[in-house]
Amino acid sequence: MQVEDRHDADLSLILPTRGRHSMLKRFFASLIQTASRLSRLEVIMYMDDDDQQCPVADATHLQTHTVIGPRQTMGTMIRTCAAQARGRAFMLINDDAVFRTSGWDAAIADVRAGHGGAVPAHLRGTGYAGAARLGHGEGYRYSHDEPNAVGPQQYLPDDLVDAEYYQPTDRGWEERLGPRWRELRAIIRGTRSGR
C-alpha cells in the first residue's frame, strides 16, 4: 500500500472513491470554492490499485493524500484512511458530495477550538416543569409576529454572536441574495429594523 507524505491539518476529510472521476472532480471544485481555510484541510482518498485516474491535479491548493491499495469493502477503506488522518477531527464524506455553503469549515474550526457556549436562554425549551425558573424562553421573540416575519434576536452563543460564517458569493443566485442576506443579518442583530 502506498501513502503520500503530508502536513498536519485541522480537519481531515476521509474520501473513499471508486471510479467516479467526474463526481470526484466536482467534489474538489466545490471544496476549493467554498472552504475559507484550505491550508488547514486535508483530503485523504482511498483508491483501488486498478483505478488510479484521479483528478487530484485540479486540487493544487489543497492537501490531498491518496492511499492506493487492493479493492476493499467500504468499511476497510474508511478505516485505512482514518488511520492516515492528521487532522484534529475527521469527517467521512462521499465522492458525490458538493459543498455549497461558503465558509463551512470556519464553523467547524470554531467548534473544535472550544467556541460556541450554551444556547441562549431565550431559545431553550419551555415545555417542562422548572423551565421558567431557569429563565428558559424568557424574552423569546416569535419571528412571525415581527414585521416581515424577521425581528432582532440572538441565535448564536455569546462568544459567537458576531460570527459570520455564510458569505454570499458574487456569482449566480448568491449575487442576488447578498443584499437581502446583509439586510436580514442587520435586522436579526438589531442594527436595522424590519420593513
Image (tube, helix red, strand yellow):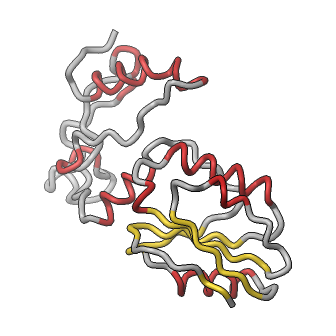
**Vertical relation: 155 (above or below) 20:** above
Residue toward you, 74 or 194: 74
Q: Residue at x 51, y 42 (%)?
A: 101
**Vertical relation: 38 (above or below) 168:** below
Quadrant into which the C terminus falls: top left
> x and y percent of residue 89 in the render?
42, 73
Residue toward you, 94 or 60: 60
Residue toward you, 149 or 39: 39
Q: Residue at x 31, y 52 (%)?
A: 125
Q: Residue at x 51, y 44 (%)?
A: 34
Residue toward you, 103 or 25: 25
Q: Residue at x 18, y 51 (%)?
A: 159
> x and y percent of residue 81 in the render?
60, 81
Taking the view exactly as shown, the residue that stands out farthest to the top is: 195
> x and y percent of residue 36 in the render?
41, 47
**Is residue 116 found left or right of 170 in the rendered image?**
left
